Image (tube, rainbow, N blue to C red):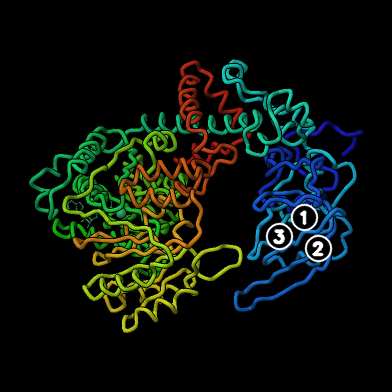
């Protein structure tokens, strides 16, 4: 650098900052931070009002979060090998009182604290057995002069944390002056949004609380992400996503696609292929797909339906139309287990009409993979069922006409597109059993049309769901024995594998012995992610055959394990799961004709809220209603779990809280197109958001 120094700009590299040399810059780069703007977009996790430090002269309340300033004494390290645990504990002395403090599995904290005179500790007060209060796993920071004010607290970036990171980002704030505002002033005014540069500055260096109060805002808003400045970033992010989706829709509509002869699959043909009558809902979806497939424009359809509602058959019929019209078809599943199960279903249906089902998964020997890849490239392989292995670069198709993606929420937009990109505008059908309320689905999957199967095949008896507590355990075990003697199979699902001091929940390894003892004479299988693949497969096979009719498992059984004889699902510590997840787990039983049961075996003393949530699952068998309740009660969750930017990967917007905003930005994107401003707005937004992820994909 030459002159006194130029003003810092958003696109400057991080070496321009004081205290960042080439090594630190490399470190930050490995965390994904390259420019000043990258750091500006790293928002504080929370804000500490350091003018309001708690005084231990007063007893804090259990469950409250407090900030203390004091020293830690009596530090001890204890090991609990049986639980693979290290505990560091001590006492905080803030000059006015004492409070016990404990850290679980943070051995390093001992060294970190050893010669610190005074610290800030921020954490939650919890009550231990016997009523002793304790600060649990608090964050720790050194005390520095001039910090008795509102201080932003950031998530660590590699070696940079605490005050050091705060100082770096504070330097960056200067660059907000030259940040370009992507929103036209009229849009800002209409939605009541502050300028972007103000938002970025305030988020990192908030005005003093008194000034915020004057503007009808406060630190609580900052901490809950509800300040006008947070809202500005959320708005821009949602608008960027909406614009990208809008462009994608335009592009896909413009592309021509293979016209598929949909008349081939008519009622007589279906009757020959499928051993049951399609439900009304299945027939509707089939009609919707026929319209798309015959239109000459590529289908982009999301098919939602509860577990067991019969999505796969409908997909198979669409596949048959494409195959019969001379096209190749690719079906992608999220796990090998699922891919294998689907491949078997398709073999049953398609072998009768002379199409061979091929597989492509990562665990196949290289030679076998190569031969399938060659077949796909020269067109001799017409139909392939596979996993992530399908979108590898080495996979090419001669004439890919239809792509089906199962359990869409397990893949990202980009992965889906990587497969679509292997054909020239192939038709796309994505399926999900994670019921997302319609309003939300339409906006989140903005570039897809929506079909819903909201009717179960006839003869299916709804799973009876009951909530039971620990004292009912002996009766539950008797019931399990009775079921197994009558030919049923039982899943028992646990939220965790090993016991932990931090999480109060039933652990598989802890309860295993009790189950074995109670079910003497019955073989019990154990299934979780720490076992290797061959062990897992062996266990599932024994369960399937009925040799080991009881399976103690983690949520690994959530998707894919399909055993029609399974009739009872016991869920231990069910309060640990989301409602939609409980519903999904429950979908593992009742797939045959046997009456099926789901028993939520809750721990004593769970809270009122937890009880109310569990009752929702007992009372409803409608996945959509449960998802809606989950959304209300739990907010953001694992409802949608894409990894890339998009739905759950938004950095600033909480799609569950901002449903209205999602809708409004979608409308705005269309308006901007109509007024000819869309291009410019996208240019502005792409400096801040990875629009390319959505745009560039095909
Ligand atoms: P999903 O993929 O939606 O979870 P599947 O397509 O796997 O559901 O269907 C679940 C089970 O129901 C399968 O065994 C399937 O053969 C059967 N099935 C599907 N549709 C019908 C129907 N209309 N009538 C009777 N059984 C059906
Ligand atoms: Mg399925």
The mark nearer the N terminus, 3 or 2, is 2
List the residue tagged with mark 2. Answer: 112
* Neighbourhood count class around disc 1 (C-alpha, 10 Å): few under 14, some 14–19, many 20 upward: some
Q: Is residue 192 above or below residue 207?
A: above
Query: Dot 1 corresponds to which residue?
Result: 140
Element under disc 2: helix
CB-based contact (under 8 Å), mark 2 and mark 1? yes
Q: Residue at x 49, y 31 (%)?
A: 662
**Image quarter (top left, top right, bottom left or bottom right) of the N terminus:** top right
Q: Whole-Å distance between the Cαs marked 2 and 1? A: 9 Å
| Image disc number at residue 134 | 3
- Residue 27, position as x, y percentages in the image: 73, 54
Measured from the top left, where is residue 74 in percent x and y? 82, 68
Q: What kind of element bears circle 1?
A: strand
Name the residue furthest bottom. Answer: 521
Of badges 3 and 2, nearer the viewer stands: 3
Percent position of residue 388, x then y? 42, 57
Q: Residue at x 50, y 69 (%)?
A: 507
Q: Looking at this rendering, what residue extends furthest in the right direction?
A: 4
The quarter of the displayed image where residue 467 is located: bottom left
CA gap between label 3 and label 2 equals 20 Å
| Left or right: residue 269 compared with residue 321 | left
Looking at the image, residue 577 lies above or below residue 363: above
Left or right? Give the position of 33 relative to 680. Answer: right
Left or right: 402 in relation to 263? right
Looking at the image, which residue is at 42% across and 72% down? 533
Among the two numbered marks 3 and 1 on one chain, the one whose residue lies closer to the N terminus: 3
- Depth check, mark 3 against mark 1: the one in front is 3
């Amino acid at each position: 650098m030459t002159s006194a120094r130029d003003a810092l700009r958003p696109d400057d590299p991080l070496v321009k900052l004081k205290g960042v040399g080439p090594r630190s810059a490399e470190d930050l780069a490995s965390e994904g931070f390259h420019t000043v703007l990258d750091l500006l977009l790293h928002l504080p996790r929370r804000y500490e009002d350091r003018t309001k430090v708690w005084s231990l002269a007063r007893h804090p309340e259990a469950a409250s979060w407090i900030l203390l300033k004091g020293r830690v004494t009596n530090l001890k390290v204890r090991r609990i090998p049986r639980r693979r645990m290290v505990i560091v504990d001590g006492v905080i002395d803030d000059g006015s009182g004492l409070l016990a403090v404990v850290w679980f599995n943070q051995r390093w904290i001992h060294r970190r604290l050893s010669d610190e005179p005074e610290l800030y500790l921020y954490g939650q007060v919890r009550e231990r057995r016997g009523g002793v209060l304790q600060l649990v796993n608090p964050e720790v920071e050194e005390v520095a002069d001039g910090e008795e004010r509102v201080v932003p607290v950031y998530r660590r970036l590699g070696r940079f944390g605490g005050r050091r990171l705060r100082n770096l980002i504070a330097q960056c704030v200067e660059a907000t002056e030259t940040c370009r505002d992507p929103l036209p002033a009229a849009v800002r005014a209409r939605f009541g949004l502050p300028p972007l540069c103000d938002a970025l500055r305030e988020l990192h260096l908030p005005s003093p609380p008194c000034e915020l109060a004057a503007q009808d805002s406060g630190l609580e808003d900052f901490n809950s992400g509800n300040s006008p400045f947070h809202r500005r970033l959320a708005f821009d992010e949602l608008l960027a996503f909406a614009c990208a989706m809008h462009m994608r829709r335009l592009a896909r509509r413009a592309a021509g696609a293979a016209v598929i002869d949909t008349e081939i699959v008519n009622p007589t043909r279906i009757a020959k292929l499928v051993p049951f009558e399609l439900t009304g809902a299945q027939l509707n979806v089939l009609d919707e797909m026929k319209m798309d497939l015959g239109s000459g424009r590529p289908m982009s359809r999301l098919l939602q339906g509860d577990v067991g509602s019969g999505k796969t058959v409908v997909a198979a019929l669409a596949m048959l139309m494409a195959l019969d019209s001379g096209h190749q078809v690719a079906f992608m599943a999220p796990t090998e287990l699922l891919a294998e199960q689907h491949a078997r279903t398709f073999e049953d249906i398609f072998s009768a009409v002379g199409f061979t089902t091929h597989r492509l998964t990562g665990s196949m020997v290289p030679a076998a993979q190569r031969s399938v890849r060659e077949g796909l490239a020269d067109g001799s392989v017409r139909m392939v069922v596979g996993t992530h292995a399908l979108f590898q670069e080495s996979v090419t198709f001669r004439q890919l006409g239809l792509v089906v993606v199962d359990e869409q929420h397990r893949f990202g937009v980009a992965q889906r597109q990587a497969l679509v990109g292997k054909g020239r505008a192939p038709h796309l059908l994505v399926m999900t059993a994670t019921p997302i309320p319609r309003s939300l689905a339409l906006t989140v999957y903005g570039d897809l049309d929506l079909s819903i199967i909201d009717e179960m095949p006839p003869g299916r008896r709804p799973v009876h769901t009951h909530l039971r507590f620990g004292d009912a355990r002996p009766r539950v075990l008797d019931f399990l024995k009775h079921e197994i003697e009558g030919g049923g199979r039982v899943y028992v699902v646990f939220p965790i594998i090993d016991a932990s001091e931090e999480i109060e929940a039933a652990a598989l390894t802890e309860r295993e012995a009790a189950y074995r003892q109670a079910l003497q004479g019955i073989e019990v299988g154990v299934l979780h992610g720490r076992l290797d693949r061959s062990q897992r497969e062996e266990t599932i096979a024994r369960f399937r055959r009925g040799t080991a009719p009881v399976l103690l498992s983690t949520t690994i059984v959530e998707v894919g394990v399909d055993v029609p004889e399974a009739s009872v699902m016991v869920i231990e510590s069910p309060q640990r799961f989301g409602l939609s997840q409980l519903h999904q787990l429950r979908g593992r039983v009742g797939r045959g004709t046997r009456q099926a049961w789901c028993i939520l075996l809750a721990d004593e003393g769970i809270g009122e809220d937890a009880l109310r949530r569990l009752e929702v699952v007992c009372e409803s068998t409608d996945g959509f209603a449960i998802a809606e309740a989950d959304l209300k009660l739990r907010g953001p969750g694992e409802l949608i779990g894409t990894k890339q930017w998009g739905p759950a990967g938004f950095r600033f917007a909480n799609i569950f809280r901002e449903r209205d905003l999602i809708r409004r930005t979608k409308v705005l994107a269309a308006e901007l197109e109509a007024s000819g401003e869309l291009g410019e707005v996208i240019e502005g937004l792409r400096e801040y958001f990875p629009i390319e992820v959505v745009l560039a994909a095909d």
